[in-house]
Amino acid sequence: NVVILGGGTAGWLAAYILSDFFNSNKLDGKVKIIESSKIPTIGVGEGTTSIFYEFLKKYKLDEADFLKETKAILETLKDKKIPYLFLNINLKGSDSLCYIGQKSFEAGILAGKLSNICTTEDDEILMVLTRKNLFNHEAIQDRIEGFLDFHQKSNSNTKIHKLQFNQPDEVFRSREKINQFIEKHPKVKGVVVPSSRVSVVCKAIDKEKLVDLRIIGFDTTPQNIDFLKRGDVTFLISQKSFNQGYKSIITIANFLVHKEIPSNEIPTPLEIITKENYMFSHSEERKYSIE
């Protein structure tokens, strides 16, 4: 039996492929998706994080159990000489075929460059952190470090503020906190959200304040795209998640069929999305969409 946590387009597509595989090979396997109701609001990546901990709690497991079982599965795959790869999350020290995903530190550097483009030397930047335990999300932490590294190495005198929330839902519930901060710091003209929650941040900021802000976020969730189209979000940095999944299947297929050995790490593009080009960024996904 297979349990897919999080859902989203990738999760449902994986479930479809696995179910078809079980049926085609007359295997008695079942696929269950446990999908977070928060995904439409906060995105698949971070919505999956919350449902993951709910899953562990429900079955009385902890992270150590999950990691132990994951390593046991990897050992089984190794013993049976079954190739596997990691998508978006890389478990270091394993014998995976390769890792396919975004270079998060470089994505943070890119966000830093974009913030430098759309603000002046006298402006200040606010970084909104939508979760407290960043150690649970290495990609977000790497983005933050990349962003700060850019400003440090470019000898930027731009003052960077940080506003911390314990969880994404708190951002809107405590919207006075962010609005009061912006009022208290009128030089803040740039806002960076290193998670996929830029839409939640935009909802929390008063409309009259959004006009004067240049906001940078990550991931092309439908909610983020809506604020991009309105002009409230200036830039989104996409990791092209559909292409990640597509590249994973192609890589495994080429290895099995053509004996092509991939590089240890296959970075996916860092695509800058604006309201002028967002409609072209998912052309591959529309081409292979399942009606």
Image (spheres, rainbow, N blue to C red):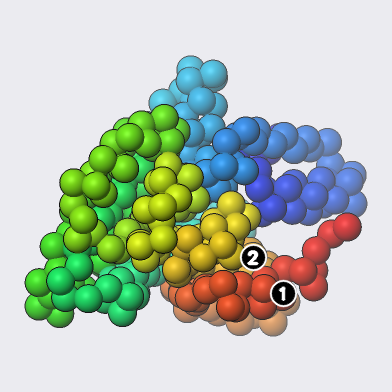
Q: Residues within 10 Å of mark 2 (few under 14, many from 20)?
A: some
Q: Position of residue 82 (x, y in %)?
A: 61, 58
Q: Where residue 183 appears, x then y in whole percent?
A: 24, 47
Which residue is found at the position 13% from the left and 62% from the top? 159
Quadrant position of the N terminus in the picture = top right
Residue at 27 percent of width and 54 percent of height: 127
Above or below, comparing residue 174 to residue 236 in the picture: above
Q: Is residue 228 left or right of residue 169?
A: right
Q: Nearer the viewer, residue 106 or 200?
A: 200
Give the number of the disc on residue 196: none
Q: Tag 2: residue type?
A: Phe
Vertical placement of residue 61 versus 194, above or below: above
Tell me the residue that label 1 is attached to: 284
Left or right of 5, for residue 216: left
Determine the secondary structure under disc 1. Answer: helix
The quadrant of the rendering that contains the C terminus is bottom right
Decide if residue 56 is in sight here.
yes
Distance from the alpha carbon under mark 1 to that under mark 2: 8 Å
When asked about the image quadrant of residue 214, the answer is bottom left
**Residues at badges 1 and 2 in contact (C-beta under 8 Å)?**
yes
Q: Amino acid at mark 1?
A: Glu
Q: Which residue is mark 2?
A: 242
